[in-house]
Image (cartoon, rainbow, N blue to C red):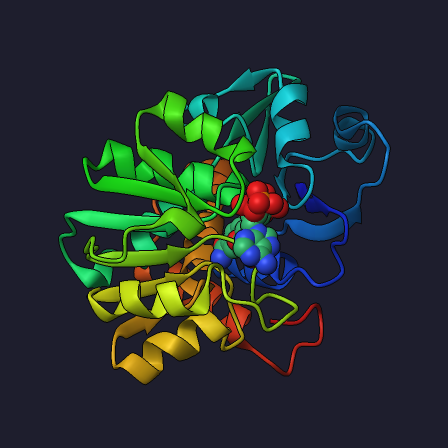
Amino acid sequence: MKKYTIFGNPVSHSRSPVMQSAGFKYLQLDNTYDKTLLTDENIKDMFFNLGLSGANITVPHKEYAYISADLVVGDAKTIKAVNTYIKQDDKIVAHNTDGYGFVMAIDEFGPLSSVLLIGAGGTARAIAVALKSANIATTVANRTAKKLEFFDMLGVDTIISNDIDTSDKYDLVVNATSAGLCDSNYPMSQDKLRRVLTDSKYVFDCIYGTMTPFLSMAKQLGIKYKDGEDMLLYQGVKAMELWTNTKATKGLIDSMRSALRDKNDKQGEL
Ligand code: NDP
């Protein structure tokens, strides 16, 4: 039996234990997956003291987890934030699977030429790196300038949200801000957003399980939209693949999805 957890603060809301436990069960592995509130403890000490074989890391620890890992692999080196730990030979190897989750989630939109990515936090970083790898022209808009520096260095276009030229057209507009998560805010000026969305084909919100003002606007305008549930699912599927060294089957993915959606399970909330 191997032990896994998700580190976060807060972490009580997380659906990852329900989803990942369903994955282990489907694979007939006798593994456990818990939640661990991490406040100011050392994540590496906690990881080894708990006897873990792997972990997920969520807000606000992804950058701290990146710094604390022994080895960082793949896109996480560019993103400089990680959400997955794997124990290998008494070392912590770290990955970022959020970009993969995003790419899988938007797959149903088909080929895209241009994306407007609103937000410049850790999630937007993972998404921008994935979009750049896929050669999709990306513009990152944020309400303030500081966090745009990362994207300038990455080589994608950046703009302060209020300065957006609403005559520019994008295939897809993504909300990677926390606007709408626990409030009724739009990620940028409502008026400008409406004008940008009017000319877009698709809308994606990283927030899941709630109809945000951003998604409501897309619905009103008759634009195809999607929330972040599949992104959450597929970042977890990729972590599962890494921990178990297997390729996820449709059966595994379906079992994790239905656990994620099971509203009767009161462990965390969507
Ligand atoms: P961060 O705290 O790192 O970044 C937050 C970003 O949102 C910043 O760019 C910030 O702008 C912006 N922002 C916050 N409030 C507002 C507002 N009222 N108006 C406009 N911009 C705002 O967060 P994360 O990148 O970690 O997460 C972003 C979102 O993605 C969250 O809602 C989270 O729930 C979701 N998420 C979903 C996942 C999934 O699997 N579906 C995975 C991870 C995250 P500024 O720089 O100006 O402060």
Name which residue lies at 39% across and 21% down: 153
Quarter-wise, where is residue 68 in the image?
top right
In this view of the protein, which residue sits in the foreground, 187 or 20? 187
On screen, residue 166 above or below 45:
below
Residue 6 placement, left or right of 166: right
Please state the horizontal and vertical placement of residue 30, each as a whole percent of the image: 62, 52
Name which residue lies at 51% across and 47% down: 143
Residue that extends furthest to the right in the rendered view of this protein:
40
Residue 26 placement, left or right of 33: left
Residue 186 placement, left or right of 62: left
In this view of the protein, can residue 97 be seen by the observer? no
Name which residue lies at 34% across and 50% down: 164
In this view of the protein, which residue sits in the foreground, 57 or 255? 57
On screen, residue 49 above or below 207:
above
On screen, residue 80 above or below 15:
above
Please state the horizontal and vertical placement of residue 170, each as a whole percent of the image: 21, 55
Name which residue lies at 26% across and 49% down: 115
Residue 9 placement, left or right of 16: right
Quarter-wise, where is residue 73 in the image?
top left
Quarter-wise, where is residue 21 in the image?
bottom right
Please state the horizontal and vertical placement of residue 213, each as a whole percent of the image: 49, 74
On screen, residue 247 above or below 46:
below
Image quadrant for the C terminus?
bottom right
In this view of the protein, can residue 115 be seen by the observer? yes
Please state the horizontal and vertical placement of residue 61, each as a whole percent of the image: 68, 37
The number of callouts visible is 0
Image quadrant for the N terminus?
top right
In this view of the protein, which residue sits in the foreground, 114 or 66? 114
